[in-house]
Image (cartoon, helix red, strand yellow):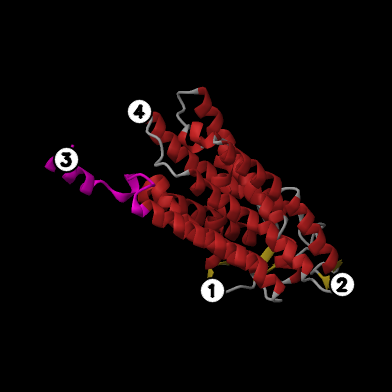
Amino acid sequence: MPATVGETVRDVAQPISRRPEGHPGGRIRQSLGWIAVAGAAAAAIIIPLAGLLAAAQAVSLCALALAVVQGPRRYGWKLFLAFFATCFVISNFWENLSIITGFPFGNYYYTLMPQLFYVPVIVGVIYFGIGWVSWMTTNAVLDRADERLDLRTRAGRVNVIALPALSGAVMTMFDVGADSLISTVRSIWIWEDGGGVFGVPFTNYLGWWFVTWTFFQVFTLMLAARQTRRPARPARPLRQVSHLQPVLTYAMFTVVSMTTFIAGGGPQTVVDPSGASWDTAALNETLMIIDIFSVVPVALFAIAKIARGDLKRA
């Protein structure tokens, strides 16, 4: 039956973000998402094997690009920008506070420029990129928990606690497998007192979980407030394949540690500011094993749930 004039006008006026993923705009988003995933894979493999640095940072920037492609579709521009602002502002607050006081990460300083107060501007951006793929990976594991945060329900009350806590843990897994290389070996930041994890103190990882939990918790409460005070309205849907893209990007951090280990060459020794000596070959091997048994199982769990169609039924 031919569409009426009114139906045609309503369809044209409908925002692209509310149109189905089968719409050309949705196909373009998926294609751009795959370009971001491919870029992350290329960076994870090529940069370390070429003997160059900053592979993890390059993967993080690809994660940022993926967030820009997917985020407005998932939450709309206002909430997406709120997610970015929350990650950027809160992470910079805690990072600056730690450089000044030692809480919550420990005593360190950055060598990278330019800086916002004492923290490189790029750091808050990287928090956001890694934060997006960590958040979406956790949502895959928890069956799109970000859509079920209504505090009037039991599931909502559980999800409002579990989602940010697990997202913070998933994001911290990346840092456990990367911080020693980026700081002790490459000196992007310097731990003034050294530490037992190849020159990094254990407080750094507790701090990472705390800091990432705080900004995920703030965003979760934003979503929960909206879902609780108005009738349930699901987030704008993504196709199954679009849920897969951030999980694959997150898994690329393990590929970085693997190719870094392969390209590592012979044993070398680095000395941290406390005077402790560390073998870089052992460091690279250990970080790779940490990633294989933390980042990879989480990614595989999320991929299995996507492949089974659990997110479609959520």
Q: Name the secondary structure under disc 1.
A: loop
Q: Amino acid at mark 2?
A: Pro
Image height of 7 relative to 230, above or below: below
Q: Which mark is residue 231?
A: 4
Q: Amino acid at mark 4?
A: Pro
Return the residue found at the far left: 5
Return the residue found at the far bottom: 51
Disc nearest the viewer among 2 and 1: 2
Magenta residue span: 1-25
Name the residue located 48 percent from the left edge and 51 percent from the top edge: 86
Classify residue 207 as left or right of residue 282: left
Residue 16 visible in the snapshot: yes
Name the residue located 49 percent from the left edge and 40 percent from the top edge: 220
Q: Amino acid at mark 3?
A: Pro
Discs 3, 2 touching: Cβ within 8 Å:
no
Tell me where residue 281 sits by quadrant.
bottom right
Disc nearest the viewer among 3 and 4: 3
Q: CA distance from mark 2 to mark 1?
A: 33 Å
Discs 3, 4 touching: Cβ within 8 Å:
no
The mark that comes first in sequence, 3 or 4, is 3
Name the residue located 58 percent from the left edge and 56 percent from the top edge: 249
Q: Name the secondary structure under disc 2.
A: loop
Residue 117 visible in the snapshot: no
The mark that comes first in sequence, 2 or 1, is 1
* Residue 270 x/y as whole percent: 82, 72
Dot 1 crowding, Cα within 10 Å, few <14, some 14–19, many 20+: few
Q: Which residue is mark 2?
A: 267
